[in-house]
Structure formats: structure tokens, C-alpha cells
Amino acid sequence: MTHIEPAAESGLDMRNKKVMTARYCVKHQMGWCQHDAGAPALREPLYLLDEEGRRYQLRFDCADCHMEVIFEPQGQA
């Protein structure tokens, strides 16, 4: 049985929670995939910022070729 939590829009506290898992990978898209020869070594973690200043940490599982997006609350470094 799969447990499904309420959507973020319902007011659920999303601080430090995974908000998305994707096969799309920012590192692959930008040519930074470590599976590709000549890809630059990156200092991680990487982050995305939205238009309202919310920050999302990107976690990469390169062995399974997917990326997770984690919401970080304001003021967290």
C-alpha cells in the first residue's frame, strides 16, 4: 500500500521535504554529468531559486540517473 500525503497547496509544512523526484537532470542538461567524459567537477550541493526567492536543494542519484528537489525554508544556509 502506498501512502500519499496531502499536496503542498493544502498548507502542509514542506520545510526540508522532497517536493519532486525527476529523471530530468540539471547536471546532464548543462553538460555537467559525471558519466560524460570531460564534465567539470562541481562543488555540491546545487540549488534552484524561484521567482519568490524560495530555495530548493538538488540531490543527485547518478547511479539510478535521477534528481530530487528538496524545499529549504527561508533563512537556512
Image: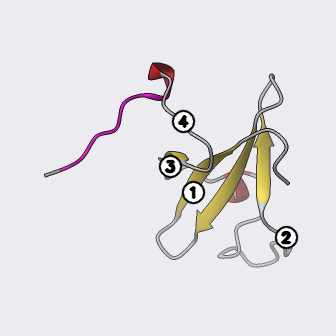
Q: Are marks 4 and 2 in contact (CB under 8 Å)?
A: no
The residue depicted at 56 percent of the width and 54 percent of the height is: 68
Q: Are marks 1 and 3 in contact (CB under 8 Å)?
A: yes
- Label 1 crowd (10 A; few <14 / some 14-19 / many >=20): some
Q: Earlier in the sequence, mark 4 or mark 1?
A: 4
Coordinates of residue 1 in the picture (x, y in percent)? 13, 52
Provide the residue designation for mark 1.
67
Q: CA distance from mark 3 to mark 4?
A: 21 Å
Provide the residue designation for mark 4.
13
Q: Are marks 4 and 1 in contact (CB under 8 Å)?
A: no
Going by the numbered disc 3, the residue's amino acid type is Ala
Q: Would residue 6 be found to the left or right of residue 54 on screen?
A: left
Q: Earlier in the sequence, mark 4 or mark 2?
A: 4
Provide the residue designation for mark 3.
22
Against 4, is 68 above or below?
A: below
The residue depicted at 85 percent of the width and 70 percent of the height is: 42
Q: Which residues are magenta?
A: 2-8
Going by the numbered disc 1, the residue's amino acid type is Met
Number of numbered discs: 4
The residue depicted at 78 percent of the width and 57 percent of the height is: 46
The residue depicted at 71 percent of the width and 52 percent of the height is: 57
Provide the residue designation for mark 2.
42
- Label 3 crowd (10 A; few <14 / some 14-19 / many >=20): few
Going by the numbered disc 2, the residue's amino acid type is Leu
Q: CA distance from mark 2 to mark 3?
A: 20 Å
Circle 1: element type: strand
| Front label number (4 vs 1) | 4
Coordinates of residue 4 in the picture (x, y in percent)? 28, 40
Q: Decide which of 10, 51 is in the foreground and name it.
A: 10
Going by the numbered disc 4, the residue's amino acid type is Asp
| Front label number (4 vs 2) | 4
